[in-house]
Image: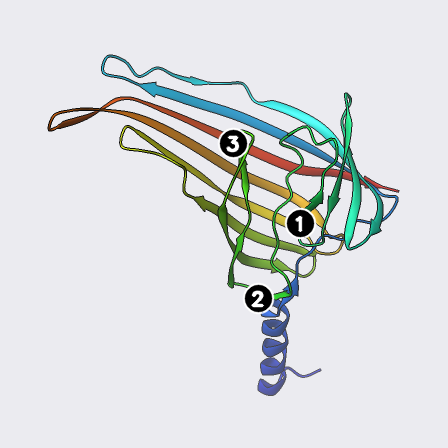
Amino acid sequence: MKATPRTILLLALLFCCTTLGAVEVRYAFRKGYTYSYQYTQQSSGKIQTFTSSPSAIQPASTAEFTVKAIDFQDGAFIVDIGDKSSTYRRYLKENGEIKGAPAESGQTIPFFMPLPAGDWKVAEKRQIKKDLNIGGKAVPAAWNLLLKSVDNEKGLAEILFAATMKLPDDRLRQKAFSLKGRLLFNLFEGVVHQADWQTSYKFTFINKEFAVTRNLWDFEKQLSHSLKMTGMQE
């Protein structure tokens, strides 16, 4: 076929429509399939006072676990999540919302991202209101999501995310928490392919004497998380 200007223009338009077209990102576990994951976490922290500022970095810890799709009922996937020591069940909606979690033990894995409903365009930002579990307590949070890119050949959607929230504080105690990261979602299989995110928590205790206000000490802790899909089998 001769590469005429009209042909080149049509191919360029087709490419743009494919890469910039809207996609639907949602979970789609296959009944009877088992998905294997590896989760790695590393923490670091420091305390700053008038006289010292010690810091420490903990060795990274890695855990292997599986997500087994049992069934899909009443608008939710029934999945069993297990490792070598225990297994627990969750009921997960297609958008990542947990519908039910009997025998939930407060574990940090697996990582299910909240997903926007309907079609989503590349470079489009979405916001979802969903509680974040901090220290065993549900804290209202706003999740800001950006669909950065879509690889149609590999079926991977790249999503950037960050969570913002307001922690309770007063004139003597100030708290701050942040969460941000990057997610690769497998559009062909409807599961998380890989996710990397960081959380940071800071607590400041303030001493106020008459007109003078000063920080007595600052505590800060960072956690780096990495989740990677390692296999899928029926």
- The quadrant holding residue 137 is top right
Tell whether label 1 touches label 3 (CB within 8 Å): no
Residue, disc 3:
224
- Marks 3 and 2, the one that precedes in the sequence: 2
Numbered label tally: 3
On the image, the x and y values in percent for residue 40 come to 61, 29
- Kind of residue sitting beneath label 1: Gly
Residue, disc 2:
121
In the displayed structure image, the side of residue 179 where residue 8 appears, left or right: right
Does dot 3 land on a helix, a strand or a loop?
Answer: strand
Q: Residue at x 56, y 52 (%)?
A: 159
Tell whether label 1 touches label 2 (CB within 8 Å): no
In the rendered view, would you say 40 is above or below 234?
Answer: above
Local crowd size for mark 1, using a 10 Å CA cut-off: few (<14), some (14–19), many (≥20)? some
Q: Residue at x 65, y 50 (%)?
A: 185
In the rendered view, would you say 86 is above or below 67?
Answer: above
Identify which residue, 8 or 229, lies in the foreground. 229
Does dot 1 land on a helix, a strand or a loop?
Answer: loop
Residue, disc 1:
96
- Kind of residue sitting beneath label 3: Ser
